[in-house]
Image (tube, rainbow, N blue to C red):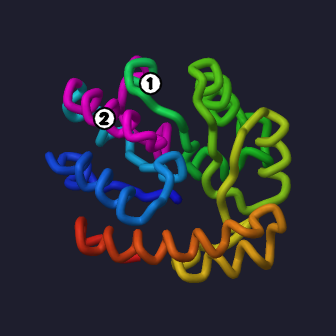
Amino acid sequence: MAVNLSARQFADEQLLSRISAVLAETGLPAECLQLELTESMLADDVERTVTTLSGLKALGVRIAVDDFGTGYSSLAYLKRFPLDILKIDRTFVMECDRDTDGMAIPSAVISLGHSLGLSIVAEGVERQGQFEILRCQGCDEFQGYLFARALPGDAIPAFLRRNAEQFAGACCRLRKSVEIWRHKMAAEFGVEW
């Protein structure tokens, strides 16, 4: 389950204790939670960011940099921060299958991320050609309309049952965890989804 954090949420002094409490209450394994942050959020206060990210990693949560390539952070931060995933912004994916220059940035991000031991996710994949060229370049995961439109939490189990046999059995556990998580996030952070 991926959750985008706002700058205000990331700066919250109680973030670690709240995430820990929600994980304990819902029974969601920490490794199943992916928190997504933007580059600009990471660059605000580097020492505090390292401390917060390290605390989240100690919980077992996965950390993703969302919309990678659109911010103004230093590449040196990628090495310093305990990250798991880089998500290539859709603006770099849109034309990757249309012209020779279209894969320059996605290819560089894939190479950079893999050399740092990070998984790479391509955002905004809408065409089969985009998927194929990114997959051939070594992109690890994909999201976009080619696979599905955004779904409300309560629709996810039915989607998984219809579309992926390998997720059989996980749907029932996921439905309960999603429902509990939705309520806790609304109560703790004012997040509605």
Q: Secondary structure at mark 1?
A: helix
User: In the depicted view, which residue is nearer to us: 54 or 145?
Assistant: 54
User: In the depicted view, which residue is nearer to us: 144 or 59?
Assistant: 59
Q: Quadrant of residue 53?
A: top left
User: In the depicted view, which residue is nearer to us: 17 or 130?
Assistant: 17
The residue drawn where x is 63% and y is 57% is: 124
Left or right: residue 171 versus residue 28 is right
Left or right: residue 171 versus residue 70 is right
For the residues carrying marks 2 and 1, which lies nearer the camera in this image? Answer: 2
Query: In the rendered structure, which amino acid carries the disc numbered 1?
Result: Leu
| 72 part of magenta stretch | yes
The spot of residue 179 in percent (x, y) is 46, 77
Q: Which residue is mark 2?
A: 55
In the rendered image of this protein, does residue 134 appear above or below residue 130? above
The spot of residue 12 in percent (x, y) is 17, 50
In the rendered image of this protein, does residue 94 appear above or below residue 70? below
Query: What segment carries the magenta color?
Result: 47-76
| 110 part of magenta stretch | no
Q: Which residue is mark 1?
A: 78
Q: Quadrant of residue 110?
A: top right
The spot of residue 39 in percent (x, y) is 38, 39
